[in-house]
Image (cartoon, grey):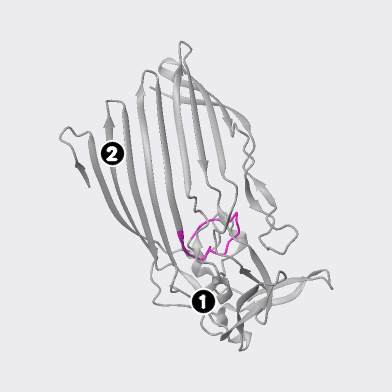
Amino acid sequence: MTAKLTTDGRTLLRASYGRFNQSVVTGELAPFHPGQSPVTTKGFDPATGGYTRIISIVDPKRNLQLDSAMRAPRTDEYAIGVDHEVGRRIAIGVTYVRKDGDDFIGWSDVGGQYRADTRTLADGRTLPVWVLVNAPAARRFLLANPDGYSLTYNGLVAAVEKRRSDGWQAFGSYTLSRTDGLQSYSGTTAAGPQASTVGAPPGAFSSGPITFGRDPNDLTNATGRLPNDRPHMFRVMGSADVARTGFVFAANLQISSGKPWAATTVVSLPQNTQQRILVEPRGTRRLSSQSLLDLRLSRTIALGRAGRLELLVDLLNALNDTAEEGLATDNVFSSNFGQPTAFVDPRRAMLGVRMNLGR
C-alpha cells in the first residue's frame, strides 16, 4: 500500500505485509531414506592415537522418527515507512521492518528419559545438565516442529539518496536491528551460517545433516541472537564523473557489527562423553566489526554498431581491514579459545574488461 501524505506528492507512506512458507527441503528427509545405514560417531582416544572411542550409534530405521503432522515453517513480514522528497534531487526515508518466523523444523528426543543434574567446570562454575537415565538404545529422535523454535527480526532503516545530476550520485543508509530466536543452527560456531533447515549446511553438503536438538543439552543458552545478527550497519555508496576524461569513479563503504557467538565447554555425560554445551547465551560475544571500502575506476569506449567496451579497475577492501571471520575454538577452557583463524579477504586489485554487444 502506498499513500500520499501531502497534496504535492513529496511525502509518501508505504506499508506492506507478506507471508512466506518454506517448501520441502529434501535434505531434511534424507536421514529417513530406506537406503541409509547406521551412523557411528567416534571420538579421539589418546591411548590409541585415533578416533576409536564410540560416542553414539544412530540407526535410522530404529532411532529416527518423522512427525507425519509436521507443518511447513512460515514467516510473516511487515514493513511501514515514510519517504520524503527534498527539492528535486534528494530523497530521505525511514522504514521499520519486522519479521516473525514460526513452526521451524528441528529434532527432539522423545524416547530418552533425562534428569536434571549439574557439572562443576574447571573455573568453579556450576553448569546445569541433563543426564540420560534409560538405555541409549531407547532414544528416539523425532523430526517435527518443536516448541520454542522461532525467529524475530526488528529493524529500523534510515536512508538518504541524492539522485544522479551534475555528474554524480550518492546513497547512504543506517540500519539498527536485532535478530533473535531459536533455530537448528543456534548451536553453530562464530563462522557458521544462519539457516532454519536441519539438512546439510548450504555449500557444505559433505558435513552431513544437523543433529542439534537431539540432546536436550543442545538447548542450554541456545535461545538468543541468531548467527547473522548485526545490530549496526552503515553504508555509503556513490559515483562521480571525472571531468573531461570519460572516466567514472565509484566507491562503496560498508561498516557492520561483527557476528555473535558464545563460549562453550565439553562435559562427559552418560549419553555422550564429549557433549558440547553453551555456557553463556548466544550473542554474549562478537567478532570484530568490519569496515569494507571498495573503489572502482571505469571508462566506457563506444564501438559504433558493435556495442561498447567497458574497462574496469577495482580496489577491494581498500582499508585492508583484518577483521576475523572464524575462530579456532569456542571452548572456553581450550588454549586456543577465541583465537582467529579466518579473516576477511585482504586488499586486492582487479582489472576487468566487459564487452556489451549491440546498441
Q: Residue at x 23, y 37 (%)?
A: 11
**Above or below, 11 relative to 189:** above
Q: What's the amino acid at mark 1?
A: Ser
Instruction: Name which of mark 2 and mark 1 comes first in the sequence.
Output: 2
Q: Main secondary structure of the magenta part?
A: loop
| Magenta region includes residue 139 | no
Q: Position of residue 190 (x, y in %)?
A: 60, 56
Q: Quadrant of residue 45?
A: bottom right
**Above or below, 352 relative to 146:** above
Query: Which numbered marker is on residue 108?
Result: 1
Q: Nearer the viewer, residue 6 or 28?
A: 6
Q: Nearer the viewer, residue 207 or 170?
A: 170
Q: Position of residue 314 (x, y in %)?
A: 56, 28
For the residues labelled 2 and 1, the Cα–Cα distance comes to 46 Å
Q: Nearer the viewer, residue 52 or 318?
A: 318
Q: Position of residue 58 (x, y in %)?
A: 61, 78
Q: Residues within 10 Å of mark 1 (few under 14, many from 20)?
A: many
Give the residue at the far front of this rendering: 124
Q: Residue at x 53, y 26 (%)?
A: 296
Q: What segment carries the magenta color?
A: 180-195
**Above or below, 301 relative to 277:** above
Query: Which numbered marker is on residue 184?
Result: none
Q: Position of residue 295 (x, y in %)?
A: 54, 28
| Magenta region includes residue 183 | yes
Does the image show residue 273? no
Q: What's the amino acid at mark 2?
A: Asp
Q: Which residue is mark 2?
A: 83
Q: Residues within 10 Å of mark 2 (few under 14, many from 20)?
A: many
